Amino acid sequence: MSRDILVDQVGMVFQGRGEPVIALEKVDMHVQAGSFASIIGPSGCGKSTLLRLIAGLMKPFAGSVTLGGESPSAARRDRGLGFVFQSPTLMPWRTVRENVELPQDIMGRKDRRAESERAAALIELVGLKGFENALPHELSGGMQQRAAIARALVLKPDVLLLDEPFGALDEITRQRMNLELLRIWAESGTSALLVTHSIAEAVFMSDKVYVMSARPGRITSVIDVDLPRPRKLDDMRTPAFFDCVNRVRDGLFGRESPVDHTVPQQIEA
Amino acid sequence: MPLATIIALVGLAEALKSGGVLPMYVPAPSQLVTAVAQTPSLLTENLGPTVRRASAGYAIAAFCTIVAASLAVTVQRLYGFVYNFSVTMHSVPIIATAPLLALWIGTGEPLQITIAALACQFPMVVGAIQGLQAADARQRELMEILSATKLQTLRYLLLPSALPYMIAGFKIAAPTAVLGAITGEWAGADRGIGAMMLYALSSFNTPALWLAILITGFLAAIGYGFWALVESVVTVSSNNVELAE
């Protein structure tokens, strides 16, 4: 099961000490249930704010956010939402297993055995088998973030929100984590929304890339990525991949001479 | 090494005393031993009540602290009330509140326990409130995403992350509970180290007075040492914790 993410004319204003700051202006998004989308944009464009609005951690100033027709807080109560932060945000006093099971502890348990099996299966899926009883400080940053992903998925959420989850990792680990994330996402069938700084990452992961600009934060273009799935690292060498990357780049930086991106039609004689 | 220092100091005091350097109101360590040997009731009758009162006051203060601090960080309106109450009680000298409390609740054991509790609450409250606010913003957001209730947030996040701060507060508070119990005993008690001090003072029994001082220090050190031990065990497991990469 999964939910559509629908963002409708969302605006957000922060009242600072001086002038009110318009963080988001008339943002529209529609992430299809079960698909993978990314938000990319410069620092301070409001992409993390947007993600927090979708998670219901903040209320929008204008417009509305619905997850499968429900408000974010209702979706959260229905176990519909998983969130992965930029930092792993594990409880340092809990073992990997206890951290992954934390959402089950809080949401209440019905079938303890099935739930522990679910947690164990996820720990294996993210490649942490054998580290169930390790404390977070005994793991590397990448392993901690994998535990955080397992935790976000343990309640089988319909929507998975990821706020630059691999931003702190080195390029090599990051590639590997992206591949793993795609595999896990495909198995779980949830809708996923990823905030990232990396153009290549956005294209590689997504069905749809939302490009944002700053001050005020708004979505300037939406790029559909029609690369086949499951995706492999070699896909990053294909012309189709580069075409998508260039379109995202154009969306971010603009282009002096506009280029027609539509597939060339048969020229009629 | 600490043991050697103590033995050396005791030896020095003994030598100085027998050399006639120390005045008559400073007894030799051996005189303290004879004082206990001659009247063992000094220890058997007075140590127990003080330990009991200090521990009871300490336990009550600890319990009230955890409840009050949890309320203070959960219900914003109570925060100022709890903190101000704690600070006010701490700024009034115990020696002044003791007679007043004696008028209100009599000079029985409840008085000493109350004073011990009042004397040691402040570091506990400060440590607990500070600790309960130690969780970082991401961890709090995680609890919100999981739709955790306030009680669950307290149980799964705030209290565990407050533990190191609380232990530090409890450690500092332990000696003051002993001092509080003794102050309470001055305000009226038949038995206890505080009562023993008063008797010794009025009968010019300097060895007994010195004994009382030594025991007080010893009790305070035990309380402090216990928590220092707990602290070392607890912080070993949370050492090198990096919350953010």
Image (spheres, coloured by chain):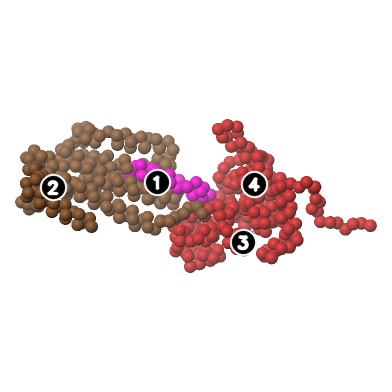
The chain to which mark 3 is attached is A
User: Magenta part of the protein: which range?
Assistant: B124-150
Q: Colour of chain A?
A: red
> Observer-nearest residue: A242 or A129?
A242
Judge by depth and name the residue closer to the eye, A136 or B185. A136
Instruction: Find the residue positioned furthest to the bottom.
Output: A130
Q: Is residue A44 above or below residue A151?
A: above
Closer to the chain start, of discs 3 and 4, is 4
- Residue placed most toward the observer, A115 or B81: B81
Left or right position of A1 against A101: right
Callout 3 secondary element: helix
Q: Residue A187 falls in which quadrant of the image?
A: bottom right
Q: Is residue B211 magenta?
A: no
- Dominant SS in magenta: helix
| Figure quadrant of residue B179 | top left
Please give the residue where the numbered disc 4 appears in the rendered image: A42
| Tag 2: amino acid | Leu
Q: Which residue is mark 1?
A: B131
Question: Label 3, on which residue?
Answer: A175
Label 3 to label 4: alpha-carbon separation: 21 Å
SS type, badge 4: loop
1 vs 3, front mark? 3
Question: Which hue belongs to chain B?
Answer: brown
Numbered label attached to residue B211: 2
Q: Front-most of A139 and B109?
A: A139
